[in-house]
Amino acid sequence: MISLPLLAIALLPFALAAHQQGAGVVHAPIVRRSHSNRVANLPKAVEALRKKYGYQVTNVKSTTSKRANTAAIPITDEDNDSSYSGVVSIGTPPQNFNLVLDTGSSDLWVATTSCTSCGSDVPEFQTSKSSTYKATSSVLGINYGSGSVQGTVAQDSVTFGSFKMSQEFLAVTNVSTGLIGDGLSGIMGLGFSSISSLQTTPFWEALYNANNLSEPLFSFYLERYVNQANQINAAPGGVLTLGGTNSSLYNGSIEYIDLTGPPSYWLLTVSSVTVQGKTITIGGPTGLAAIDTGTTLIGAPTPYAASIWAQVPGSMELSGDWQGLYAFPCDTNVTVHISFGGTNWAISPLDMNLGTLNNTVIGNTNATSQMCAGGIFDIGIGSTPAWIVGDTFLKNVYSVFRASPPAVGFAQLASGSNSSTGSSDPNPVQVTGLTPLPTSTCASSSGSSKSSSTNSGSPSPINNIALSLTLLASVAGCFTLFL
């Protein structure tokens, strides 16, 4: 992936956010970082996702697999997929950062100039240049599936879209090698406060509690570039609307499904999956699913993953480092619909095809049919939630996350939208009223003694594949607070 200057990113034509009148509604353009070398890193991505939700990793599937007591098993070099990010401003005067947007976690953190392990491609927050920055005496360490971050619990002015408020966050001073990079500086968690490692209220929820939102919700439209032959570093990635919805991006009404259980993750129950016309009934505890913008794939429990791929002629389960992933003949259109108790929502065959595999991976050097990796994988069994429903599905719908009454809603994408057609036009629905992306004012680490994960010039695409599953990993209760 070729790193672009933040100024160039700021000038991208983010023509996806329709202007709507009324206070308390903000349409924030999303940057999607995409890469052509996705397939080789799928095994690491799967491992990171398992760690994100506390799944036990085993070399052999077992019906006695138990949930891990800790997520402190680092997975390094998590260079697998793409991520969706938005510009968040921190401090006075504001410093702008690209942070990944994750409904699967609830904390805000950003790398600072005190970070001794951040690469030169990580824009850093200069705490000394913010007149409103307040550090506490608490140091927090968070262990992720593929690494960890440590830093000081702090408070400062945070702006997202037109919303501004004082927010507690983690000012990071140490990051595991490879955890972030290439213009991304941290995470904005969009889950509920009950799963916050900082034990604080997430930015969006604080806005809701203060009655600053027109409606108690936020909504996503996510772009698709998986079908492009030539991937780019950063491209218009969709729209996050805080406090409302954008009616130009969907057709018909929004179908809301009440959350399963108290608010924590955005949890629904998968009731059925239809593959190649064959319906597999699920429901009950085995259908509990986290709706997660921070996950690229769909993770299904072992027996259901097997049932899903059994409906695809010529499909096969992979082994070794690729265990849990499935392959299928590339000339097959895999048609999948998923239901949470109402509409059967279609998943485009484009999103079910993650790219071609070489014959060594599939264990058959004499294979005559080219095989591709599938977008649904076996996440294992014995953990809660049982399913992780990520962007493989969410690119196909307009998604709404509602605080009161707590629910997730889906709607059919507007005709002509990127994801509804599989095209890649940067302004498919011709919406207007775009709010320009702010120019970055964050610190550059050039000239400092920061370590760098890339060489100058054109970085290796393998080492710079966006770190969505790493960056968006939520904590499974493994953090240490030092007072």
Image (tube, rainbow, N blue to C red):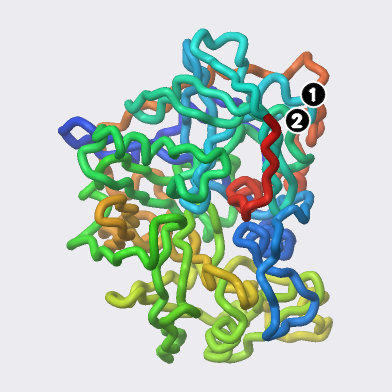
In percent of width and height, residue 243 lies at 27, 40
In percent of width and height, residue 50 lies at 65, 64
Q: Is residue 11 above or below residue 329?
A: above
Per the rendering, the mark at residue 396 is none
Secondary structure beneath dot 1 equals loop
The answer to which of 278 and 271 lies nearer the viewer is 271
Task: Count neighbours of disc 2 (C-alpha within 10 A) and say few if under 14, some if 14 to 19, many if 20 or more.
Answer: many
Q: Amino acid at mark 1?
A: Lys
Residue 231 visible? The answer is no
In percent of width and height, residue 144 lies at 69, 49
Left/right of residue 453 with respect to residue 428 in the rendered view:
right
Secondary structure beneath dot 2 equals loop
Q: Is residue 144 above or below residue 68?
A: above
Could you say which quadrant of the image residue 312 lies in? bottom right
Residue under the point 32% across and 57% down: 398
Looking at marks 2 and 1 on the same chain, the residue that comes earlier in the sequence is marked by 2
Do the CB atoms of the residues marked 2 and 1 lie less than 8 Å apart?
A: yes
Q: Quadrant of the N terminus?
A: top right
Q: Which residue is mark 2?
A: 119
Task: Count neighbours of disc 1 (C-alpha within 10 A) and say few if under 14, some if 14 to 19, many if 20 or more.
Answer: some
In percent of width and height, residue 408 lies at 33, 60
Q: Amino acid at mark 2?
A: Gly
Q: Which residue is mark 1?
A: 450
Q: CA distance from mark 2 to mark 1?
A: 6 Å
Q: Is residue 419 above or below residue 328?
A: above
Residue under the point 73% across and 82% down: 61
Residue under the point 46% across and 32% down: 12
The answer to which of 126 and 12 lies nearer the viewer is 126
